Image: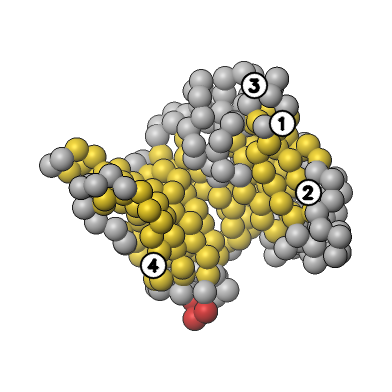
């Protein structure tokens, strides 16, 4: 929901098939008339990595996605709008990872509020593998130096609860007797006090691509894709967790 009460949407678009990559498009609703005409805001993006759209506590819209830079670098970039999507800034990298990969890694960024401003979480193999974070301080256009969160994690998703607690979830690879599986991890980081980390799935299932949303009483609804080792059937599972 945008500051003007309309709904904004961003997505990867494949209509211009002559491009090496996808097109990033944005559209918003117009009162009761539904969504208006979409506009291009990114011309050569990574084909499949999830995008994110977020409005901060200063009514500024942020969009992050994985771009294709110089034909081979696939780093996360950011652009913003202060007029509800009428105009956007030029895209800039949130971190110069310089990850060269000739294909889509299928893992996009996540944006949320934090006490440091707006926080970004993403996976990269540029330098050292892992999920990293950076902050964009209020009233600035400068990103802090990236910090490694977890060298084994993929597919991060983050939200900030109404009480200020940041919740970060991801999938992480573990070695087992039968090979390798992915487990879902989640960290609660309150404004005051120490953070806590737990894994909500076991080594009997292969799980990935978690998402989350806040419920009442600071509880979090999580969902993810889960495949049992025995029958190799993928299904969507969910759980309600709290700090």
Report the Cα–Cα distance between label 4 and label 2: 32 Å
Q: Earlier in the sequence, mark 2 or mark 1?
A: 1
Q: Earlier in the sequence, mark 4 or mark 3?
A: 3
Seen at 56% across and 35% down, the residue is 48
Q: Secondary structure at mark 3?
A: loop
Report the Cα–Cα distance between label 4 and label 1: 37 Å
Determine whether label 4 and label 1 are within 8 Å by CB.
no
Query: Can residue 148 be seen in this snapshot?
Result: no
Q: Secondary structure at mark 1?
A: loop
Nearest to the observer: residue 159 or residue 215: 215
Instruction: Say above or below: 224 vs 214.
Output: above
Instruction: Say above or below: 142 vs 101.
Output: below
Nearest to the observer: residue 115 or residue 113: 113
Residue 9 place in picture, x, y as percent: 71, 51
Seen at 74% across and 55% down, the residue is 8
Instruction: Say above or below: 24 vs 133.
Output: above
Residue 239 place in picture, x, y as percent: 39, 67
The residue identified by callout 1 is 15
The residue identified by callout 2 is 27
Label 1 vs label 3, nearer the camera: 1
Q: Earlier in the sequence, mark 4 or mark 1?
A: 1
The residue identified by callout 4 is 239
Q: Earlier in the sequence, mark 4 or mark 2?
A: 2
10 Å neighbourhood of mark 4: few (<14), some, or many (≥20)? few
Residue 199 place in picture, x, y as percent: 30, 59
The residue identified by callout 3 is 20
Identify the mark at residue 24; answer none if there is no mark.
Answer: none
Residue 224 place in picture, x, y as percent: 41, 55
Report the Cα–Cα distance between label 2 and label 1: 15 Å
Report the Cα–Cα distance between label 2 and label 3: 23 Å
Q: If the image is split into quadrants, where does the C terminus sit?
A: bottom left
């Amino acid at each position: 929901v945008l500051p003007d009460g309309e709904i904004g949407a961003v997505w990867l678009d494949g209509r211009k098939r002559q491009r090496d990559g996808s097109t990033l498009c944005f559209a918003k609703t117009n009162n009761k008339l539904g969504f208006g005409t979409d506009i291009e805001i990114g011309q050569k993006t990574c084909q499949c990595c999830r995008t994110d759209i977020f409005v901060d506590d200063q009514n500024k819209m942020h969009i992050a996605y994985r771009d294709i830079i110089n034909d081979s670098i696939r780093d996360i970039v950011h652009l913003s709008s202060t007029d509800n999507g009428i105009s956007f800034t030029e895209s800039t990298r949130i971190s110069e990872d310089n990850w060269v990969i000739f294909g889509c890694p299928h893992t996009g960024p996540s944006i949320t509020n934090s006490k440091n401003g707006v926080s970004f979480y993403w996976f990269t193999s540029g330098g050292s593998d892992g999920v990293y974070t950076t902050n964009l301080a209020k009233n600035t256009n400068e990103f802090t130096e990236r910090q490694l969160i977890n060298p084994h994690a993929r597919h991060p998703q983050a939200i900030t609860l109404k009480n200020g607690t940041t919740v970060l979830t991801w999938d992480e690879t573990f070695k087992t007797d039968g090979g390798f599986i992915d487990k879902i991890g989640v960290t609660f980081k309150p404004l005051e006090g120490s953070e806590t980390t737990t894994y909500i799935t076991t080594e009997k299932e292969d799980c990935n691509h978690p998402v989350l949303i806040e419920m009442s009483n600071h509880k979090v609804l999580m969902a993810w894709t889960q495949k049992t080792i025995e029958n190799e059937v993928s299904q969507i599972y969910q759980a309600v967790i709290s700090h």
